Image: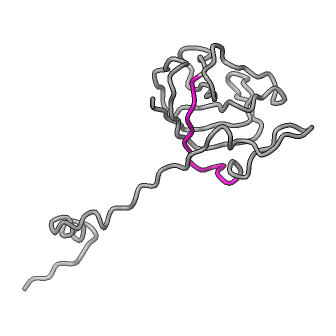
Amino acid sequence: MITLPLSRRRLLVAASALGLGLAFRPALAAAPDLSFDELYGSFSPLGLEFSDKVKDLTGEKVSIRGFMAPPLKAEAQFFVLSEIPMALCPFCSSDADWPENIVVVYLDRKQTFVQPNQMIEVTGTLDRGSWVDPETGFVSQLRLRDARYKTV
């Protein structure tokens, strides 16, 4: 009898041949869902305070559903996701003007924009805190980076 060293590849090939391949595949975890109602925990004279859920999920991949506000320009690689359909893009000049029902989305690649009345689901890495986009001057409090979206 000839014995061959048991490599991971041989083990997976053998398991697949025996119909056991699923047991060796890592489970794909879905990104946690976030809703607009869960973005902020309170409002004080100092402004909006992020919710505990947002604080816990900062730096993690999350999914949120909403509507794409009309982009500032057609070739932009970012857009504003809003809780309700909007006719105009809300462009904030300072973080004091930041509405509680929007999230800025920075795409990982260019995608075709959709109509503002079409619900989409966006998945990306959650980032929080005041930040000014160096290219556009757009001020944001919440962002999804390296994001993609799909219609739902």
The quadrant of the rendering that contains the N terminus is bottom left
The part of the image, by quadrant, that contains residue 95 is top right
Where is the C terminus found, in terms of image quarters? top left
Up-down: is 118 above or below 145?
above
Q: Nearer the viewer, residue 86 or 134?
A: 86
- Give the magenta part as a residue range: 56-68
What residue is at 71 percent from the left and 51 percent from the top? 55
Q: In this picture, is 106 found above or below 86?
A: below
Residue 59 is left or right of residue 8, and the answer is: right
Q: In the image shown, does 100 or 91 lie closer to the viewer?
A: 100
The answer to whether 90 appears left or right of 11 in the picture is right
Q: Position of residue 28 (x, y in %)?
A: 41, 55
Q: Residue furthest right?
A: 45
The picture places residue 50, in percent across and down from the top left corner, at 76, 45
Identified at 70% across, 28% down, the residue is 133
Query: Which residue of the protein is positioned furthest toward the left in this rendering?
Result: 1
Residue 146: image quadrant is: top right
Depth check: 145 or 96 in front?
96
The tally of labels here is: 0
Which residue is depicted at the point 92% across and 37% down?
45
Secondary structure character of the magenta stretch overall: strand
Q: Position of residue 21 (x, y in %)?
A: 25, 64
Q: Is residue 39 magenta?
A: no
Q: Residue at x 31, y 66 (%)?
A: 24
List x then y, in percent, for residue 140: 73, 31
User: How is the model colour-coded?
Assistant: one colour
For this view, does 95 lie left or right of residue 34?
A: right
Query: In terms of image quadrants, where is residue 87?
Result: top right
Relative height, residue 64 to residue 26 (above, below):
above
